[in-house]
Image (cartoon, grey):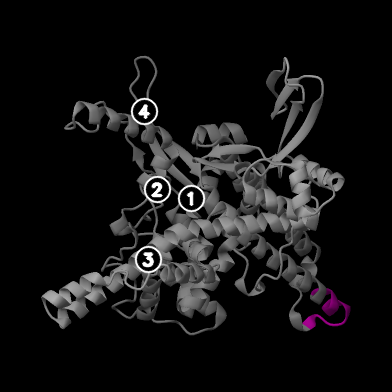
């Protein structure tokens, strides 16, 4: 099965297919490389790995997802697989940027010297990015050339490739498709364009070594006593927050100056570059297997011939997609900020220069100030407004889910509480949203039962004499009880976005998993029709194929739309 579905089978999303009932329970979280991944997120990642690389590889991946960073011996023990199968699975996951290895020094037993052990981290985000390969291909095809798209697809399909392997793949695909073979100069130009656009980067080191912190590594040796004490406390807090997984990923990443650096000799060693001979005829898959048979050295940063390996830079595509949505909001806020500056803002320096020197110097300084001011305004606007825009988009997405699942009245009440950001009493909600109190209480209880709202029950007394107040917690709700002659009960409601967003993200992972399973089921049911040539599909077979194709387009388009919302909560 190919590493990603063909891009031509996808069309622009037409709607969000969100299941009406998800058999949902409260999401349980597992700590993995300093991020929280819900149970449905783990199930989705395991399904993706299983559909691309098989059940054995997915079993190893699931073990790492659920148990965190492990050694090879621990993975073998937990999965109950043969050691060679685990090694091969780790090679496949590493080849496709789903696992990162690192070495640490472990203290030995009594009288034993310290030993070096290798541990493995699963990269959840890179696994989920496999669903977005068609989006990434679309971006490259729109911005760059067809040759760039072919090179990019090769990196998506094989994970990590050297320049020689890219050339071999291009020759192989050209022979199979009957197309014209592109010259090496054209391939080099297309590859350079991908790297210059930061869509392709150098692979990280295969197995970086994390040295234990030394006793002499004390910060701020030349500082004063008071400042050194404050600096030590802050540095210790920062080190405590940085996990060993984060240190490993940082150590594996290439330096900023080398991440997108193309050596001048990169293409000079390619067979056929200078002598005019054809590249080697070995297939990419065979060379990749030969280059990945060992786990030692820098096998995932370079191959056996010490050739630099390249991969897709997912971070750049996430950044492009993050800045792609509502640009008109930036324009509106920019115009509002522009009109609030006033007529004489920033014009005095150029006037002073004109007075002291001449008009030419004043014009030059005015142009410099204008350019600097526009750049500063742009940077400040993007940094301050992007977070607000993402928050607005998240609110709108959750409100649309509430509207579809609970109706318009529930949508109005949820929107009121979301904008208020505090506890609001039931009567006030009912009066503001024009909903009968009996219906309002019923809807609010339903939202609270599904973890969309937080409720607090307040009991008050009307007798001020000898009044006694007790505050206690009951099932996670704060209860205030006043003992007196008569008591009244008030229900207070609010939206806790920090916990709700986690719940919504888990529901989205669940919905994406349902869509992937449904697509796989449809393909399995119509497997025979997919194997029949198109020209032989006539009569009932043609109608059946058209119905299958229509269902598949709707499902895949809905998955792409759902992934847009998923990125809004998980990646942005």
Answer left or right for 271 relative to 432. left
Q: Is residue 52 above or below residue 456?
A: below
Residue 359 inside the magenta-drawn segment: no
Q: Which residues are magenta?
A: 536-545
Q: Is residue 543 magenta?
A: yes
* Up-down relation of residue 362 to residue 104 (above or below): below
Work out how far the residue at label 3 is from the one at label 4, CA to CA, in angstroms.
54 Å
Which residue is labeled 2 in the image? 206
Name the residue that disc number 1 marks. Answer: 94
Residue 281 appears anywhere in the view: no
- Residue 278 percent across, percent down from the top left: 39, 77
Look at 34% across and 15% down and name the residue there: 111
Q: Which residue is mark 4?
A: 115
Q: Residue at (34%, 72%) from the top-left corner? A: 271
Q: Earlier in the sequence, mark 2 or mark 1?
A: 1
| Disc with the residue nearer the chain's start (4 vs 1) | 1
Front-most of residues 153 and 412: 412
Q: Which residue is mark 3?
A: 377
Q: Residue 442: x, y in percent?
A: 84, 44
Q: Position of residue 72 (x, y in %)?
A: 50, 36
């Amino acid at each position: 099965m190919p590493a990603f579905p063909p891009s031509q089978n996808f069309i622009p999303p037409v709607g969000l297919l969100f299941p009406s009932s998800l058999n949902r329970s409260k999401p349980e979280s597992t700590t993995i490389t300093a991020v929280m991944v819900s149970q449905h997120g783990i199930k989705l990642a395991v399904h993706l790995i299983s559909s691309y690389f098989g059940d054995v590889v997915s079993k190893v991946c699931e073990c790492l997802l659920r148990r965190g960073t492990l050694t090879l011996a621990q993975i073998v023990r937990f999965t109950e697989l043969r050691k060679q199968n685990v090694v091969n699975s780790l090679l496949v996951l590493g080849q496709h940027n789903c696992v990162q290895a690192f070495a640490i020094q472990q203290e030995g037993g009594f009288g034993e010297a310290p030993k070096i052990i290798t541990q493995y981290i699963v990269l959840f985000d890179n696994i989920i990015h496999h669903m977005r390969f068609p989006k990434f291909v679309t971006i490259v095809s729109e911005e760059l050339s067809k040759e760039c798209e072919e090179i990019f697809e090769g990196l998506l399909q094989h994970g990590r490739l050297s320049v020689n392997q890219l050339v071999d793949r291009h020759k192989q695909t050209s022979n199979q498709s009957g197309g014209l073979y592109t010259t090496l100069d054209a391939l080099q130009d297309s590859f350079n364009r991908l790297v210059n656009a930061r869509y392709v980067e150098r692979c990280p080191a295969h197995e970086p070594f994390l040295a234990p912190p030394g006793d002499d590594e004390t910060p701020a040796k030349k500082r004063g006593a008071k400042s050194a004490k404050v600096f030590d406390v802050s540095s210790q807090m920062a080190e405590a927050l940085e996990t060993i997984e984060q240190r490993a990923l940082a150590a594996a990443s290439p330096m900023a100056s080398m991440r997108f650096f193309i050596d001048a000799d990169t293409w000079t060693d390619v067979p056929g570059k200078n002598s005019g001979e054809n590249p080697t005829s070995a297939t990419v898959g065979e060379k990749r297997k030969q280059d990945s048979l060992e786990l030692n050295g820098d096998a995932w940063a370079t191959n056996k011939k010490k050739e630099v390996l390249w991969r897709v830079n997912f971070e750049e595509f996430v950044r492009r997609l993050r800045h792609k949505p509502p640009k008109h909001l930036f324009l509106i806020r920019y115009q509002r900020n522009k009109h609030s500056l006033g007529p004489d803002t920033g014009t005095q320096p150029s006037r002073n220069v004109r007075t002291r020197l001449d008009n030419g110097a004043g014009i030059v300084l005015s142009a410099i100030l204008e350019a600097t001011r526009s750049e500063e305004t742009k940077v400040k606007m993007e940094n301050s407004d992007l977070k607000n825009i993402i928050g607005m988009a998240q609110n709108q997405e959750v409100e649309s889910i509430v509207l579809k699942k609970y109706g318009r009245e529930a949508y109005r009440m949820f929107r009121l509480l979301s904008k208020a950001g505090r506890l609001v009493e039931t009567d006030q909600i009912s009066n503001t949203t024009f909903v009968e109190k009996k219906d309002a209480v019923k809807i609010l209880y339903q939202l609270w039962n599904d973890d969309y709202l937080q409720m607090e029950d307040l009991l008050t007394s009307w007798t001020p004499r000898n009044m006694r107040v007790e505050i206690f917690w009951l099932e996670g709700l704060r209860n205030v009880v006043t003992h007196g002659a008569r008591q009244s009960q008030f229900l207070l409601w609010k939206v806790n976005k920090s916990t709700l967003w986690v719940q919504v993200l888990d529901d989205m992972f669940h919905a994406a998993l349902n869509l992937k399973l449904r697509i796989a089921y449809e393909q399995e049911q119509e497997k025979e029709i997919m194997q029949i040539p198109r020209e032989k599909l006539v009569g009932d077979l043609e109608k059946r194929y058209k119905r299958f194709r229509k269902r598949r387009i709707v499902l895949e388009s809905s998955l792409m739309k759902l992934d847009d919302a998923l990125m809004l909560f998980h990646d942005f």
